[in-house]
Image (cartoon, rainbow, N blue to C red):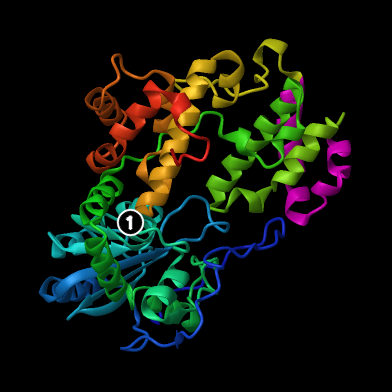
Amino acid sequence: MTDQMQDHRLPEESEPQQTPVGDLEPPAPATVALVEPADGVPAVLVTQRELQDYAAALAAGQGPVAVDAERASGFRYGQRAYLVQIRRQGAGTALIDPIHLPDLSILTQALRGVEWILHAASQDLACLAEVNFVPDLLFDTELAGRILGRERVGLGAIVAAELGLSLAKEHSAADWSTRPLPHDWLRYAALDVEVLVELRDALAADLHRQGKWEWAQQEFEAVRLAPPPAPRIDPWRRTSAITTVRDPRRLAVVRELWYARDAVAQERDIAPGRVLNDRAIIAAALALPRDRAALGALQEFQGKGTRRRIAQWWEAVAKAKALPDGELPARRIPSTESTPPARVWAEKFPEAAARLRAVRATMRHLSRELSTPQENLLSPENQRRISWEPPAPATAESVGQLLSDFGARPWQIEVSAAAITAAILDPSSVPEDGQG
């Protein structure tokens, strides 16, 4: 740890309770605890010269590179990386502070054409891209485990099952924006990339044995090239317990408080739930308080940080109460789906419902046969879309082409198109359990 990593601990806001998350699955029996990196815990890189030296070492290294990132979800606004971990044979392990070094493009250049190994890559690629650190090739150990039909694919569980090692995960939900980072946290971070290459090799060997190597390659590339998710429509509707709020006026209170909270959180770089928790937003909406004093009297608004901004919260509530009826939110979010919700098919569209039942049962059968989860064989959305309006005439070729238009990968089409076509043409021939 260097003197340049100053203390930037998060100030208290509304005293929320930290919820532990992460890989809580118990390790398999008879494992060996992995407690110390082979080369010790490296100092955190914080200077451009240190970064240049490590880039040169990476370029001269051999084999694939293990990569991980730590964020501060639940503590800071957004999903930026607060620590980047890298390990490659010949270069060793580096722990990099992307706050001091916000441009890691020199590492991207050093690793041109090199395969990256990440676990659950879709969780980290976006924050790595923000610091200009992007892969040319990818191997995702979590996704490989899913394709192989592993029941437990959290990093700790899969390392235990494949390598016989137990990997502690107690700091997965820590506030990684903390400076200086505690030594125990740095040890944990270094261990996260310690065995990824060995894990990759074990999973790759099984992918080849099961004839699923090409499947995995297509899935990895889809993850690597996936565009950023589209902005959510009405993100405030994801407020916890919003289903208890039923009328438009109270929904408007939720909306205005949500956006007021988000503005404060973004300005202060604090997770929104630490500024004002969801329980308080819902309580205010249900109470529909008559004035600022009544809002402040609610139990959920008694926290020190919450009381400090009571004028701001009341302004949002008052705005919602004053809105004309025509500007109140609808009770339900306008659907952007190309098909109606599947829950109404049986009553309103029985033929489509019969096709969907048969397609789902068919995919369950294929899942058992191929030892791969059905959602990996073909996404639930694509199962619905092909059932709603199949091509006419429905042939394996036309179904495959439509699935391709929906974004299915070639391997998914190869294993499912013929079976789906049969299900579409004669839904009654497919038993409920999909074993026909």
**Local secondary structure at mark 1:** helix
Residue 178 placement (x, y as % from top left)? 51, 69
Q: Is residue 84 left or right of residue 251?
A: left
How many residues crowd mark 1 within 10 Å: few (<14), some (14–19), many (20+)?
A: many
> On the rendered structure, is 341 left or right of 213?
right
Q: Position of residue 319 (x, y in %)?
A: 72, 25
Query: Which residue corresponds to the image point at 53% horizontal and 46% vertical from the top-left?
Result: 266
Q: Mark 1 points at which residue?
A: 128
Q: Is residue 253 visible?
A: yes
Instruction: Indicate the quadrant containing the C terminus: top left, top right, bottom left or bottom right.
Output: top left
The image quadrant of residue 5 is bottom left
| In the image, residue 269 above or below residue 7 | above
Quadrant into which the N terminus falls: bottom left
Residue farthest along the top direction in this orientation: 326
Tell me if residue 298 is in the magenta stretch: yes
The rendered magenta stretch, by its main secondary structure, is classed as: helix
> Where does the magenta region start and end?
292-321
Compared with 78, 380 (above or below) is: above
Q: Nearer the viewer, residue 156 or 295?
A: 156
